[in-house]
Each structure stands twice: as C-alpha cells, then as structure tokens.
Amino acid sequence: MQQFMKKPISLLVLLALLLSLAACGGNNAANGQGEDGPGGGQSENSGGSGDPTPPEEPEGAALPTEDPSGAPISIPETIESIVVLAPSLAETVVDLGLGDKIIGYDLQSVGLAGLPEGVPTFDIMNPDVEQLVALAPDVLLVSSLSLSDQEAPYQPLIDVGVCVMCVPTSVSIENVRTDIQFLAAALGVPEAGEAVLGELNAQLDDLAAIAATIPQEERKSVYFEISAAPYMYSTGSNTYLDEMIQWIGGENVLADQEGWISVEGETVVAANPDVIFTNVNYIDNPVEEILGRDGWAGVAAVANGQVYSVDNMSSSLPNENIITAMTQMAQALYPDYYTAG
C-alpha cells in the first residue's frame, strides 16, 4: 500500500472534505441525467461495517457504465492519461500503480508520494475547465467538491471526449472499499484493486479481532477534534471517522449527534472523554493547546495526559490509508491490546 507523505491541509479545505458530502454537481446533468440523479441530490453512497469483503466482480466483467454518483459513463478501452481532483482519489490511483499516468492533479495533492512533479495543478473547488480541456485527459476523476455548485460544469470536457467520473466523498468504511473496487475496475487494473483491498481488509480484520477482546468495562470514550478552539469541529455518528473510532473499540462522546458538527467547549467538558485525539496541523503544538485550554483541566483526558495527535491525511481522507490513523488511535487507546509493529 502506498506510503503517503505527511502534509498540511488547510482548515477550509479539510472542513470542505468532511462537510461537503453532496454529490458531484452537474456531472449527471452533463451526461443526460435528470434532477433525480446525483446532480439533484446526495448519492446513496453509504454502508456499514459488516462483512469486510465487498461484493466480487464477475471474472471478465465489462467496464462500469455508471460512476458511484449514479452518472452514466463511457470508459475508453485504453487509459493513458488521468487528471485527478481529490487527494483521497489521487492516493488510491497511486496505490493502484497508475501514478505514472497522472498528468494533472489538485493543489491539495501536491507533495503526496507517487505523484509526478512538474504537471499542471488545479484549484480543487474551482478548477480551470479551459486548462482541463486543453490537457484532454482520457479520464477526469472528481469528488464531491469541484464546481459542485454549478450545473453541468464538465460538459466542455465531455464534448471533447473526456470520460468524467465522479466518486462522492465516502461516508463509511464500506464506501472506501467499494470506491477502491470501482476505481480499479474503471481504470482497468482489477488485480491491483484486489491487492489493495486484500491488504486493507486483512488489517481491518486484525483491528476488529483485537477490539472484540476488550472488555466493555475497559472501553474508553473519545473526543476527536478536527478544528481547534475557538472554532472546534468534530464528528458525530454516521461518518467514516466515527466508524473508525468504533471499529477499534472506542466510544465517540458525540455519537448522539450526526455528521460533522461544530462543538462548544462546554459540550466536551460535560462529556468528559477518557481520550482526546486531534488531527489539527495548522497551529503549533495542538496537543499542548488542548492540555492548556481554559476550563478543561478537569476533563479526564486532559487530567491524565491522554491527548494525542493523529496523522492528518490518513484521518482526513477516506481511502485505504485510513488504516494508518486507525492503528495510531488503537495503540494510543489500548496499548495493552494493540502493540506497535
């Protein structure tokens, strides 16, 4: 699995990645879909933490004719050039062994391991469509963010024969798996997809097996901070990050709320988490900032020094690399159960 580079990601883009879960605006309209398609509402791209193995594609299956947003697509038989406008997708394309086919990517992906240098880069939320048309890639991969407020934003690319594929931001671990499977099938490397999925599933199974041995009375409560004071943000239920916490045996103190949420300090103090995680990387020493936060001295995690930094990219981007953040959290939560390897 691709080893990614630790890289700062701006607060605004991080929050957009986490909060903008609408389907790819206009992609379906551009391909002839009506308002009931993903251009008119959120894709049902959700799942649970059941069977860790996604459905297998039949051997010799045809290329997908629909992307995960529900838009019809026509994939070229041979793909020689790819532009990708989402860091989570860029990491997966590299992990599938196709980094050398990438001829452009978004600015937030700059510095990720495996991406070529010296190629055009684009604003993730408002890419230069004229420049994309001039590049004329065989495939353009987008997420829920790029030009999501516009109708048919990619029509100029479709008009020149570019296959535009939208992969809405995953909301669950099952989404992560099915998105990997889709990308591998669509890009013509199903065997590489099986390898990436096999490694991810094995690691998820290992974590789940250990979590199952942790007695209920030893389970710890968790607050995960993705934006620091005074504008604190965190995760409630029905998000991939909440599922990651549960998977390793943690209990999210904000699970009674749903989605990505703004948080008041008093709420966290009242919840009194045993452990606090932060993936904030835009301030110096986010752990020390939390430990010294006014009014938090009595919080169990602060009083006991149980505040930890978690890798920003692997906890912010829902793809196969979530396993890195999950392992870090597991070893901090339950060092007697999860040993560093």
Image (cartoon, rainbow, N blue to C red):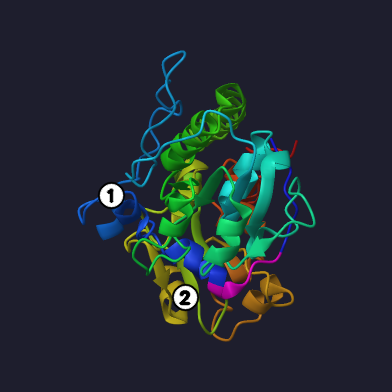
Residue topped by disc 2: 269
Please tell me how crowded label 1 is: few (under 14), some (14-19), or many (20+) other residues with Cα within 10 Å.
few
Please tell me how crowded label 2 is: few (under 14), some (14-19), or many (20+) other residues with Cα within 10 Å.
some
Residue topped by disc 1: 32
Residue type, label 1:
Gly
| Visible residue check, residue 298 | yes
Establish if 18 lies above or below 100.
below
In the image, which residues are magenta? 8-12
Farthest-out residue, front: 160
Q: Where the C terminus falls, by quadrant?
A: top right
Q: Position of residue 275 (x, y in %)?
A: 56, 60
Does the stretch in magenta take in 30? no
- Foreground of the two, 104 or 254: 104
Element under label 2? helix
Instruction: Report the mark closest to the observer, 2 or 1.
Output: 1
- Principal secondary structure, stretch drawn in magenta: loop
- Foreground of the two, 210 or 11: 11
Q: Where the N terminus falls, by quadrant?
A: top right
Q: Position of residue 143 (x, y in %)?
A: 47, 54
| Visible residue check, residue 42 | no
Establish if 51 lies above or below 300.
above
Q: Residue at x 42, y 41 (%)?
A: 175
- Per the model, the C-alpha gap separating discs 2 and 1 is 51 Å
Residue type, label 2:
Val
Q: Position of residue 117 (x, y in %)?
A: 79, 54
Does label 2 or label 1 sit earlier along the sequence? 1
Q: Residue at x 58, y 25 (%)?
A: 198
Instruction: Tell me the quarter of the picture where residue 66 sits.
Output: top left
Q: Position of residue 290 (x, y in %)?
A: 62, 75
Farthest-out residue, top: 59
Element under label 1? loop
